[in-house]
Image (tube, helix red, strand yellow):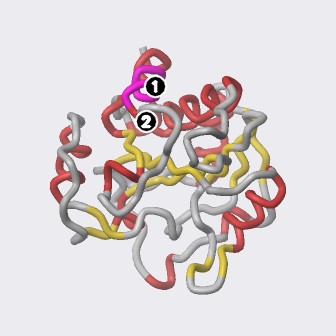
Amino acid sequence: MATPITASALLSALRNEGCRVEEVGDWRNHHRNHVGRWGPVHGVMIHHTVTNGARKTVELCRRGYAGLPGPLCHGVITKDGRVHLVGHGRANHAGLGDDDVLRAVIAERRTPSPNERNTDGNTRFYGFECENMGDGRDPWPEAQMDAIARAAAAVCRHHGWNEWSVIGHLEWTHHKIDPRGFSMDSLRERVRKLLA
């Protein structure tokens, strides 16, 4: 359990971890806090966007769409390995998930398979959307994979969390398949090595 990182500390943490960061608009004050709380936070959730094209992807994640207003995450990680900060605060990224999964994340251990949707993840997780079609064929360039691991490690390092605090959306709810195209265990291993 942790108090959410400040915007300035997030920016510093990402840069200190070696991320190339782009600040998008008034990201520090762009959030959904008026509809619910953000925090305490317990982990980092990774998603794929089902989009292609960095500019379009970042704009979608910043603005959202009809029925799901933005921000749709805190940072968008494009194929070139840049982390675009689009929001800070509650974001529409995680939705409802399994309280058993949340308990495992808090305990920093492997999560069980999700089978319930009874817990608000938007309150409890940082979210990074990653530019990819999510069809299992769209490649994940090394620059992007490195940036995903570094962004997750930056947040974990700030809070003193280990790699088990990083989950995929598919590990939060059985209604999602993202991220598709790499295993979360392989990503967690990258995070573990960075934190070591």
Q: Is residue 168 magenta?
A: no
Type of amino acid at the residue the image marks with label 2: Cys
For this view, does 60 lie left or right of residue 134? Answer: right
Q: Residue at x 63, y 51 (%)?
A: 75
Q: Which mark is residue 191?
A: 1
Instruction: Please name the amino acid that badge 1 sits on.
Output: Val
Residue 101 placement (x, y as % from top left): 22, 51
Region of the chain picked out in magenta, as a range: 185-190
On-image quarter of the C terminus: top left
Residue at the spot x=37%, y=51% of the render? 170
Mark 1, secondary structure of its residue: helix
Residue at the spot of label 2: 156
Q: Residue at x 53, y 37 (%)?
A: 181
Q: Of 82 and 169, which appears nearest the observer? A: 169
Horizontally, is 67 left or right of 38 in the view? right
Q: Does 178 appear above or below 146?
A: below
Task: Estimate the x, y position of residue 123 in percent, counting from the top left.
Answer: 38, 66
Q: Is residue 187 magenta?
A: yes
CB within 8 Å, label 2 to label 1: yes
Q: CA distance from mark 2 to mark 1?
A: 9 Å
**129 versus 98 height, above or below:** above
